[in-house]
Amino acid sequence: MKKKLLTDVELRARWSRDRKQELCVEEGTLLTPSARDFIREQGITLRYGAAKEPPAAMTVTPIPTRSGKAVYIDAQTGRELDGKPEEMTHLRGNLLVPKTHPRIEFRGRMDSLMAQIMDVQIEAEESGEHWITEELDELLAYARSILAAEVKEEPLPEVRLMGMDSTAIRRASHQVKKTFGIDHPVPSYQMGRVCVALNRLRTQVREAELSAARAFRDGEACSRTDIIEGLNRMSSCVYILLCRKLAGRRNREEQP
């Protein structure tokens, strides 16, 4: 039986429902390093062997009906539509937008990003770098939480990835020499497959961030700075993984 991996993001979501100091998890559940950090910080006790809790479902806005027929609205014009056109898709509930809408493009970028993370995990596993696979599990969960926050139009929780808050992530990614004892790496095929894959993933996160900047631009302001910051720190985390790999620092304890 495949063991379940409990990430920091999932753990925080479960704990925030009722703030219980005891959580039930399946026998054999594995914890990411950040999940273990969170358990220590909050004084949580895990109880193993309990029945599996159903996963938290993404909130879905029901589509209203009239005479048994779904009622759709053009979100940009407010016009009622006779059916759902093929060239349009759901922004939220029965609100439809063109499939070229910036928000839909952003969701597509996030889908591509999550697929890319899993590709890099395969590269890492085949190269015997399980620690990278484990760290990327946390980033994958965080990417999913970003997409969920956008779809449900809910705020994204404060950034905390790989045992670091937003400030520590930024500091580590900017002060590479001080943090890891190496110069800022210049990407090269000579780094090997895993490092090249990590560098490619870093660019994918940056592309998702740029897509978000376009999607949430409201005149001169940005309506989702939380998502922009989250993606920015996520790309920094991938860069940190690259630096750790090159510096031979597998353990988090060797970073600030």
Image: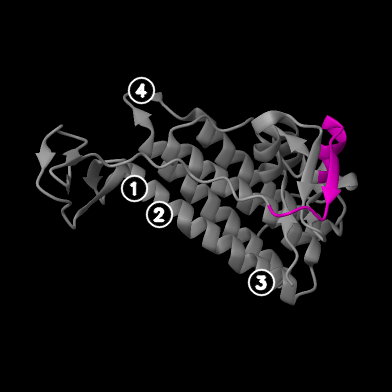
| Magenta residue span | 36-52
- The earlier-in-sequence mark between 2 and 4 is 2
Looking at the image, is mark 1 or mark 4 nearer the viewer?
1
Residue wearing tag 3: 122
Question: Tags 2 and 3 in contact by the CB under 8 Å rule?
Answer: no
Residue wearing tag 2: 108
Dot 3 crowding, Cα within 10 Å, few <14, some 14–19, many 20+: some
- The earlier-in-sequence mark between 1 and 4 is 1
Question: Tags 1 and 2 in contact by the CB under 8 Å rule?
Answer: yes
Q: Secondary structure at mark 3?
A: helix
- The earlier-in-sequence mark between 2 and 3 is 2
Q: CA distance from mark 1 to mark 4?
A: 21 Å
Q: CA distance from mark 2 to mark 4?
A: 24 Å
Q: Residue at x 82, y 61 (%)?
A: 28
Looking at the image, is mark 2 or mark 4 nearer the viewer?
2
Q: Give x and y (percent) for residue 191.
A: 72, 68
Residue wearing tag 1: 104
